[in-house]
Structures are given as structure tokens and as C-alpha cells.
Image (cartoon, rainbow, N blue to C red):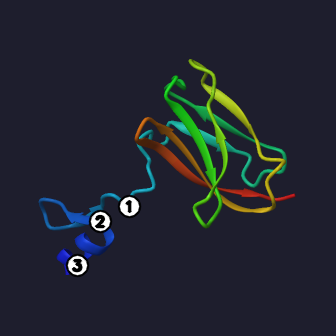
Amino acid sequence: MLFLAHGLLGIDPDEEGLAYKGELDMGKELGDAYRVYPNPAKEAINIELLTDVFTEQTEVIVMDIMGRIVLQYYPAVSVKSIVLPVHNLQSGVYILQVKEIDRILFSERIVVNK
């Protein structure tokens, strides 16, 4: 069963044989060291890093539920927070991803509600 989970779902067993998420992890490299608010949002979403700063490699992506990129943003370097305008997006559920190069720092489900 673990072989099937590994092959189909990208889940690997640890040393004790317990399964954990591998490639399907939503990306929580920063753990709880960030805040995304308000959620749901009407006009803008605040993204705040609590222990780090955005770098020149940081990219913020908003995707619709089909995985299409609907918003792409490159924040200023060395800031701890940004305001991401979402007023042009239709009401709905989206995935917010903050990446650096090929690493997903975190992903959050966000709701735009007008």
C-alpha cells in the first residue's frame, strides 16, 4: 500500500513506517512565520513575513482553482510586508504561492469576496 501511495501520491514512509507528505506538500517552508490577511478580501491582501524579508528572487503568484496564473507580483527587496491588490479578480477561491527560485515558501487558499 505504501508503494502505491508513493508512486501515485508522492508520499514516502519515514523510518518508523509512517507516511508523510513529500512532493504534494502545500509548501510551508516558513511554517507559521508569515501572515496573510484579510481572508476573505475585497480590495487587497496583506502578506507579512514575521521572521524574514522578501528578496530579489521572491515571486508571488495567485492561481485560480484550475491552476492558471491570474496574478504575478515581484515585491521590493528587503521589505517584510506587501499589499497585493486583488480588486481586479472575480469573486472566488484562489491559491496564493510565495516562491523563491524553485522553492515554495508557502501556499495559502485565499478567497476574494466582493
* Amino acid type assigned to the residue bearing label 1 in the image: Leu
Instruction: Tell me the CA gap for discs 2 and 1.
Output: 6 Å
Q: Within 10 angstroms of label 3, few (less than 14), some, or many (20 or more) residues?
A: few
| Sequence-first tag of 2 and 1 | 2
Considering only vertical position in the picture, is 38 above or below 63? above
Where is residue 99? Give x, y as percent.
Answer: 49, 39
Considering only vertical position in the picture, is 26 above or below 78? below
At 45% from the left edge and 55% from the top edge, which residue is drawn?
26
Q: Which mark is residue 10?
A: 2
Q: Residue furthest top?
A: 78
Tag 1 residue: 24
- Image quadrant holding the C terminus, namely bottom right
Where is residue 75? Give x, y as percent.
Answer: 63, 28
Considering only vertical position in the picture, is 40 above or below 7? above
**Left or right: 98, with 4 as reference point:** right
Q: Nearer the viewer, residue 49 or 11?
A: 11
Tag 3 residue: 4
Splitting the image into 4 quarters, where does residue 36 fall? top right
* Amino acid type assigned to the residue bearing label 3 in the image: Leu
- Asked whether disc 2 touches disc 1, contact meaning CB atoms under 8 Å apart, the reply is yes
Instruction: Tell me the CA gap for discs 3 and 1.
Output: 15 Å
At 55% from the left edge and 30% from the top edge, which residue is drawn?
50
Considering only vertical position in the picture, is 41 above or below 51? below
| Sequence-first tag of 2 and 3 | 3
**Left or right: 107, with 109 as reference point:** left
Q: Residue furthest right?
A: 114
